[in-house]
Image (spheres, rainbow, N blue to C red):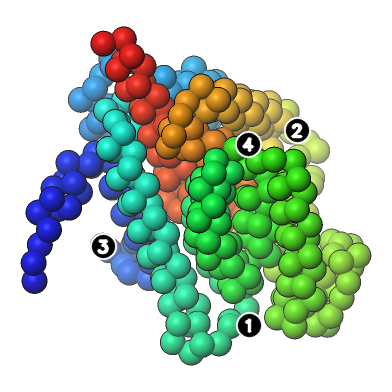
Amino acid sequence: MIVDRRKFSEVIEFPLLINIVLISTLVAVIGGVSLLGFNISGIAWVLPLLFAGVVLLANFGKPTHFPVVIWIPWVTYVLLYLLLSQEPNALQRSTIMLTPIIVGIAVSVLIINRDHLERFEKHYTYMGFAFLFVALLKTGVLLSLRLPTHGTLAAEVMTGTLLCCLYASSFALGNTKAIINWAMLAIIPVITLTRTGVVVTSLSLALTFAPLKRWQRILILITIISLGIAVFNSDRMQKKMFFSGSGNITDMSFSNPNFTTNGRLYTWSLFAEGLAKQPWFGYGANASEMLVFTYTGLRHPHNDWLRFLYDYGRVGTIIFAITIFWQMWHAINLARESFGRTKLLFYAGASSFPLFMLFMFTDNIVLYSAFFGNFQFTILGVAYASYSYSLSEKRS
């Protein structure tokens, strides 16, 4: 076996933290392996956090264009609630939520030049093909050549959606071949029967903040709607959507007993009384987990907006929402000033947040930092680092 020393050297020279995030994300997607009694998917967020901490300590005081000030109110609020909380697992859940921010800041202080950007694109492209292979393998499609009859891989689909953001931005910026990669990943939620994933992933192309022409967006939306209707009316999706195995789009209502919610409606109803009693400041970090566990034996409400409202109240939820929109605005503005792959990454990072917020309505994406958050903020971190490097080059 002949080893290409140049390619091997590229991997070693490429910032280690970024590779750690990509590898950890793929490890989380693979899952199914235990380490020291823990599922490896559940601890894949830890390694990026540790390496990010080392990077920040080594670069303490180094200026960054990452908008740290935007995140200070939310981080402060979470830490304050953590200090006051007596709920079990509050430390772990709070740390998971804040890990992507720490990773993004750490990545942003790295030196990222044009060669690094090119390698990053290659690496996440390899990761995309690996993700596709793993998804087809885990659903059994690769071995049986049959589509699964029940929903699977909800968290993994979120990783695919983030990759779709990258290819959607690339396509909008003129790389027409990127639509092929986007389509290969966008089909995964259809295969895995993840309903929110089907909707959110398909919207990643139409809702990209990268500059698509109006007629292109309209054409894409028409195509998505047409394909979406076809998928909805397929036998597999009908059985997933309705207890009877059939129904219309107008039947998709939580008040319809024929509409399947996988227990979400009952779980969400548990929050009504508590939210009415303490709407503004909530019950403390991770209080929602104990509520859900007491009545269902589960750990999460499958709705992060409800989680935030119950744990942090309206005040905390509003702070979080403002932070998200501010971060999007900041990234989009810098995207307009940037060029090439830096522009692409800024747009992809910004475009991921609306999709993130949609996933929050039906799942626990906030706690899926190993699948989504760490990679999401790495994309932003690389963009900010590259932007900083290009400014320093102009000054010198």
Identify the image quadrant of residue 222: bottom right
Q: Nearer the viewer, mark 2 or mark 4?
A: 4
Answer with mark 2 or mark 1, whichever residue precedes in sequence: 1
Which amino acid type is shown beneath numbered disc 4?
A: Pro
Q: Is mark 2 on a helix, strand or loop?
A: loop
Structural distance between the alpha carbons of marks 2 and 1: 40 Å
Residue 119 spot, x, y in % from top left: 30, 45
Residue count near mark 2 (Cα–Cα under 10 Å), binned few <14, some 14–19, many ≥20: some
Residue 363 spot, x, y in % from top left: 62, 55
Whether pointer 4 and pointer 1 mark residues with C-beta atoms closer than 8 Å, the reply is no
Q: Quadrant of the N terminus?
A: bottom left
Q: Which of marks 3 and 4 is in front?
A: 4
Which amino acid type is shown beneath numbered disc 2?
A: Pro
Q: Which of 37 and 39 is in front in this view?
A: 39
**Residue at the limit of the structure toward the bottom, as seen here:** 144
In the picture of the structure, the residue carrying the numbered disc 1 is 149
Q: Nearer the viewer, mark 2 or mark 1?
A: 1
Answer with mark 3 or mark 4, whichever residue precedes in sequence: 3
Q: Which of marks 1 and 3 is in front?
A: 1
Structural distance between the alpha carbons of marks 3 and 2: 40 Å
Q: In this view, does 7 lie to the left or right of 203?
A: left
In the picture of the structure, the residue carrying the numbered disc 3 is 36
In the picture of the structure, the residue carrying the numbered disc 4 is 211
Image mark count:
4
Q: In which quarter of the image is the C terminus?
A: top left
Q: Which of 371 and 312 is in front in this view?
A: 371
In the picture of the structure, the residue carrying the numbered disc 2 is 279
Structural distance between the alpha carbons of marks 4 and 1: 38 Å
Residue count near mark 4 (Cα–Cα under 10 Å), binned few <14, some 14–19, many ≥20: some
Which amino acid type is shown beneath numbered disc 1?
A: Thr
Identify the image quadrant of residue 31: bottom left
